[in-house]
Amino acid sequence: MTPATLHPRLQEIVEDFAAVPDRDRLQLLLEYSQDLPALPERYAEHRDLLEPVPECQTPLFLAVEVEPDSVVHLFFEAPAEAPTTRGFAAILHAGLDGLEADEVLAVPAEFSTQLGLADLVSPLRLRGMAAMLARIKRQVRDQRG
Amino acid sequence: MALPYDSAPKFAEYAHPEMIVSTEWVAEHLDDPGLVVAESDEDVLLYETGHIPGAVKLDWHTELNDPVTRDYVDGAGFARLMSEKGITRDTTLVLYGDKNNWWAAYALWVCSLFGHPDLRLVDGGRAKWIAEGRPVSTDPAKRPQVDYPVVERDDERIRAFRDQVLAHLGQPMIDVRSPGEYSGALLHMPDYPQEGALRGGHIPGARSVPWARAAAEDATFRTRAELEAIYAGEAGLRPEDDVVVYCRIGERSSHTWFVLQHLLGYPHVRNYDGSWTEWGNSVRVPITRGDSP
């Protein structure tokens, strides 16, 4: 674990989580979950374009777009009854949307373990977030060709 | 002081009607002294998004499990947890949760290991409470700390371990997982690959009765007559049988354990909480593949 290699935007999220006491950390995750942007129409009407992430305990779908200039955009959908999954998605959206493809690919696979959530959320639940990141990176690699 | 039972006609048919209450009953008794309502969910944040007013949160991963060993908290840990939640040994503890009450039934089963005297499950759980438009609150419940006694966990009566299951082969066993997990076609529950196993199939002799057979569309339990038809009729269980139930980590089988033990009144039912994540990863234990026991 070498936090020094984290992109400043992810580093900022890690510091936000580190700055609050345990009890408020879940509340922070909940706030993230409430800020997850809704799907744009082009995906809302074509759900077949979304990739399922079965590693999350509740169904989550995501889409990744890499623009010609290499900028990455992320889209997620998860039900309101799955706030933890939504929270994980929102953290990745806040940290990665708009970055360059190389910056996304450089995110360490174990990023989710740096948020201080393991004891509050359980390592098993956190695996869902690692799986989302892995799928995002794979799609970025595929689309960049 | 124990609260009155829910006298709904549906519940009166069950072997232990004192173990189950309706959402109406909860709404009516919410402010009664001696009652604590606890929410137990798969999603660790769902409680924070809104819960039955006054209900405390009881998390299976972070509170009921030992953080290191794959086991539950011990007597001292359970006493500390209950004390913090404002639950005394005399409290009527009413549990409800998401996902058809899987985790609420699991929490109820864990509380039963410590012999908490008055435990009840809310028929239909969180989904029914929400669907009926009943009030929810995002205020965390503030209950004064109380003193719950240290009671040692009793793992003999309703819990089974791997070696006991090996010795149980040939006797009644119910596998409550999905048909694909039972046959061995799937190494994990659909949508839950992180709880997989190296080998697929079921414990030899176990009958397949997926947990959801016991639940109606609205997450409530089926009537006694419907449950009898499934478990006594189709699966051939008799009340005097020594039964072991299992799933993948023991939570869906807690739901079936509750049905057999409390709704049908079978006295000898044990939940094998190691379940398929232990059996399917164990060296040289017998496994059967395919759709037949």
Image (cartoon, rainbow, N blue to C red):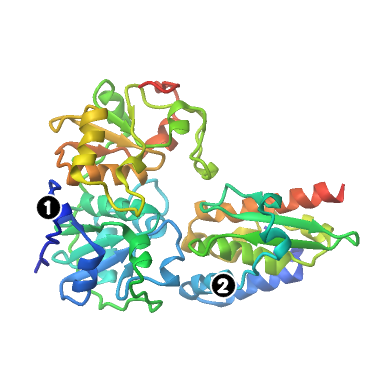
Quadrant of residue B240 within the rendered picture? top left
Compare residues A50 and B91 and report the one nearer the observer. A50
Q: CA distance from mark 2 to mark 1?
A: 42 Å
Numbered disc 1: secondary structure: helix
Compare residues B123 and A87 and report the one nearer the observer. B123
The three-letter code of the residue at mark 1 reads Ala
Residue, far right: A69
**In the image, what residue occupies the spot 31% across and 60% down?**
B96
Compare residues B282 and B49 and report the one nearer the observer. B49
Q: Nearer the viewer, mark 2 or mark 1?
A: 1
Whether residue A16 sits left or right of residue A99 in the image: it is left
Quadrant location of the N terminus of chain B in the rendered image: bottom left
The three-letter code of the residue at mark 2 reads Gln
Residue carrying label 2: A34
Whether residue A6 sits left or right of residue A77 in the image: it is right
**In the image, what residue occupies the spot 16% across and 29% down?**
B238
**In the image, what residue occupies the spot 52% across and 59% down?**
A118
Mark drawn on residue B118: none
**In the image, what residue occupies the spot 15% across and 47% down?**
B14
Instruction: Kindly identify which chain the residue marked by label 1 belongs to.
Output: B
Whether residue A125 sits left or right of residue B120 in the image: it is right
Residue, far front: A45
Residue B65 appears in the rendering = no
Do the CB atoms of the residues marked 2 and 1 lie less than 8 Å apart?
Answer: no
Numbered disc 2: secondary structure: helix
Instruction: Kindly identify which chain the residue marked by label 2 belongs to.
Output: A
State the image coordinates of residue B225 (x, y, percent, origin top left).
19, 41
Query: Around disc 2, counting alpha carbons within 10 Å, would you say few (fewer than 14), some (14 to 19), or many (20 or more)?
Result: some
